[in-house]
Amino acid sequence: MASLRTLYDPLSDDASDIVMDNDGTDSSMQQQQQQKRRRRDPLDSALVLIFPGPNSFTGEDIVELHCHGSRAVVQGVLSGLSSLHLRSTTSTALIEKSNRRKIMTLRPADPGEFTQRAYAHGKLGLVEVEALSDLIVADTSLQRKQALQQFDGRLSRLYLGWRKELIKGLAHAEAVIDFGDDEVLDDEDENDNDDGRSMDTDGGMSIWGTIQPRMSSLRHAMDRHLADASRGELLRDGLRIAIVGRPNAGKSSLLNLLAGRDAAIVSSTPGTTRDVVEVILDLEGVRCTLLDTAGVREEMEEGVNDIEVEGMKRARRAARDAHIVVGVVDACDYERGLDAVEELLVNGGGDDDADVELIDSSSVVKRENVLYVLNKVDLVDENDTPSYSKEMMSNKGSPSFGISCTTSEGVDSFLSSLTEQALSMVSNDNNDGSSPNSNALLSVEGTEGAVITRARHRRHVEAASEALARFEQLSGQGYMALDMAAEELRLAASELGRVTGAIDVESILDVLFADFCIGK
C-alpha cells in the first residue's frame, strides 16, 4: 500500500498541552486541531509504502519512507523518528486515556540487519545473502548479472539437489545398520544381481545397489563444477593486469592512455615510477585493476639506488600475482627490453635467488596470459627496423602489438585483444560442468549457469567431493566398511549444507552481515 504524506517533526507538537475534560474527551477539539496544525513543523512530502508481513523483504511488517535526498530533509526525518519515544514518554497518561497512540522506540538498524532478519525468517538463504552483498558492491555489468543469477537461487538449488541425493544414499546405509542384512535398500534392488549372484554369496559387495553409481556420478558432477578455472571468483573479485618492462619503455604512458587521465607521472628520467600505481578499468563488464610498475633493469646499472631496487621487487611481485601481464618493450631498445620481460616471467617474480627456489609452477604467468607491446613505433623508421623484432616476440608464444602512446597508433587493436583476453578468463564455456544437465541422472531444474563465486563455496564442494571419493573405495568393501562408508556420505552432505547455510554458519554470518551497508 502506498500513499503520499506530509511528514511533521513530532517534537514541534507537544501533545501534553492538550486539555482533557474529566470524561477524558478533548475540549474545543476543532480549535486545538487548528492550533496544532499551525505549530507543526513540516519536514517533507514523502511517499509512504507499507509492506505487511510475511510478504515483505524481511517477513515482518515494514514501513518505508521515500523522502527527498537533501541533508536537511534526511537529517530532519531521522531526528524525528529517533525522538518519537521522547514524545511517547511525556504523554503516557494521555495515551493511556485516549488509547489512540502506541508507544514506540525506534533505533538505527545495525549494518545488514534487514538482510539478517530476512535470513532468520527464511526469506533468503546464505548463498542468496552473499549474492545480495555482491550485488550491492558490483562495479560492472557482468558482476551485476552474476550476482543476480546467484540471488535467484540457482546455486542454492544445485547444492540442495546434490545434498538431497547424498541424504538418500545415507538413508540406505542407515537402513542396513539399523535393520540388518535382510533390509532391502533400494526399490530397484533385488535379492539377485544382474549376473545372478546372490547378496549372500558376494560378500555384501552389492549392498549399495544403484546408490554407488549415483554417488560416483555425483562426484564427477562436483569435479566438473570445480574445474571452472575460478571464473566466478575472477569475475566477482576482478582481474589484475600488470604492466611491466624496462624503465622508459612507456608503461606509465600506456596506463594513462588506457585510463583516459594522468594517473601516473611520466618523465624521461629512468626510474620515475617507484611504487605500484593502480587504475580501475571496465573492460566490457570485466572489472580490471591495471597496475603500472617500476621499470626492471640490472641493479648494477648506473643510477640505480635502494629505492628503485625496492620498486623492482614490487614490480616482480605484481607480475607474479597478476592474471594478465603486459610486457612493454621500447622499439628503440627492443633487445634489452625483451630480455627484461623474459627474465621477469621466467623467474616467476622472485625477489632474489632464495625466492626463486620457493616458486612453484602456479606462480608463473601462463604464456597465453602474456601480451607483448612494442611501444614507440613512431620513432623508428620501418625500413630501419629489423623484421625479426616482432617475430622474436611472436615466437615467445604470446600475441604482440606495435603501438605508439604518442600518436595512439595500434592502441585500439591492443585494447580489443586485451578485452577479449579478460572476457575469456571469466566467461562460462559450458565445459566446466557447472550445469548439472550434463548428467540427466542428477539434473536439477533451474540451475543453468550456476558457478562458484567464493572461495568458501569451493572449499566445501572440494571437501564433499573428497568424501565421495573415499566413499567409493569403502563401498566396495561390503558390510565390513558399511559404517565408515556411511560416515563419508554424512560428511559430504554436511559440507554442502555449510554452503547453503543449513549447518554451522554462525561465524560466517557475523562477518558477512558486518560488511553490509546500514540500509540493508
Image (cartoon, helix red, strand yellow):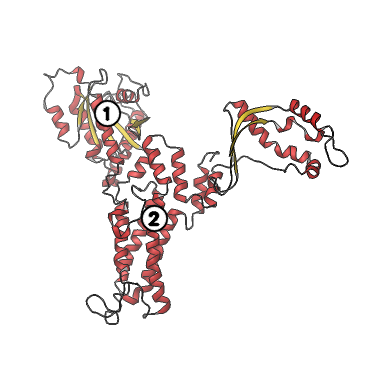
Q: Which residue: 40% across, 38% down?
A: 144
Residue denoted by label 2: 159
Q: Residues within 10 Å of mark 2 (few under 14, many from 20)?
A: many
Identity of the residue furthest to the bottom in this view:
200
User: Residue 380, position in %: x, y?
Assistant: 17, 18
Q: From what the image shows, is residue 114 above or below residue 67?
A: below
- Residue nearest the observer in this picture, 104 or 140: 104
Element class at badge 2? helix
- Label of residue 415 in the image: 1
In the figure, residue 368 lies in which quadrant?
top left
Q: Which residue: 25% across, 24% down?
A: 411
Q: From what the image shows, is residue 64 above or below residue 157?
A: above
Identified by mark 2, the residue type is Tyr
Element class at badge 1? helix
User: Residue 332, position in %: x, y?
Assistant: 19, 21
- Residue nearest the observer in this picture, 112 or 381: 112
The answer, for residue 200, to whether it is visible in the render is: yes
* Residue 46 relative to residue 330: left or right: right
The answer, for residue 297, to whether it is visible in the render is: no
Which callout, 2 or 1, points to the residue nearer the camera?
2
Q: From what the image shows, is residue 494 above or below residue 116?
A: below
Q: Residues within 10 Å of mark 1 (few under 14, many from 20)?
A: some
Q: Which residue: 38% across, 35% down?
A: 141
Who comes first in sequence, dot 2 or dot 1? 2
Q: CA distance from mark 2 to mark 1?
A: 38 Å
In the figure, residue 312 lies in which quadrant?
top left
Quadrant where the image shows the N terminus: top right
Identified by mark 1, the residue type is Leu
